[in-house]
């Protein structure tokens, strides 16, 4: 929530087990949690891969060239999922998850 009135809901539930001799175990392990996050990211990318860009939808109603001029766009833009997957912030988050 982040509004200061209510506590945020956790994204993950991780059990921490303290053993003798200063050993700590996590369940799921941090590697398993990273794997889960990577699978979720791939699944989300797959879900949005079927969503067309707005000019593609609108160009079906009007002339394609008119729409491209109106939006000042190239005739073929990258799909939105590709733009998101190659975004610098997305890459940074993926790198942090892998650490």
Image (cartoon, rainbow, N blue to C red):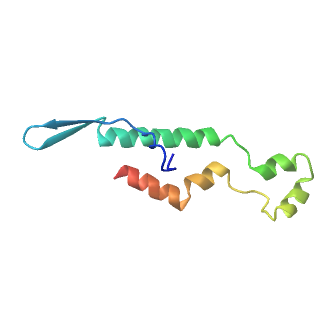
Among the 4 quarters of the image, the one containing residue 65? bottom right
| 88 or 21: nearer the viewer | 21
Examine the image and state in which quarter residue 45 appears.
Answer: top right
Give the residue at x 59% y 53%.
Answer: 84
Residue 39, horizontal then vertical, whole percent: 46, 39
Drawn side of residue 6 relative to residue 19, left or right: right
Q: Position of residue 9 (x, y in %)?
A: 45, 39
In the picture, measured across the screen, residue 61 lies left or right of residue 54, that is: right
Q: Position of residue 98 (x, y in %)?
A: 37, 50
Residue furthest toward the front? 5
Residue 51 sits above or below residue 79 on the image: above
Residue at 18%, 41% (x, y): give it: 24
Nearest the viewer among 12 and 86 is: 12
Left or right: 60, with 49 as reference point: right
Residue 71 lies left or right of residue 29; in this view the side is right
Q: Position of residue 57 (x, y in %)?
A: 82, 46
Q: How many marks?
A: 0
Residue at point 49% right, 46% down?
Answer: 5
Q: Residue at x 49, y 39 (%)?
A: 40
């Amino acid at each position: 929530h982040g509004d200061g009135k209510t506590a945020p809901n956790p994204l993950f539930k991780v059990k921490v087990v303290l053993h003798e001799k200063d050993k700590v175990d996590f369940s799921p392990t941090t590697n398993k949690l990273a794997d889960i996050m990577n699978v979720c990211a791939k699944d989300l990318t797959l879900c949005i891969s079927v969503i067309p860009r707005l000019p593609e939808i609108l160009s079906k109603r009007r002339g394609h060239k008119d729409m491209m001029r109106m939006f000042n766009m190239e005739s073929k833009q990258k799909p939105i999922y590709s733009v998101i997957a190659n975004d610098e912030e997305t890459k940074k988050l993926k790198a942090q998850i892998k650490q």
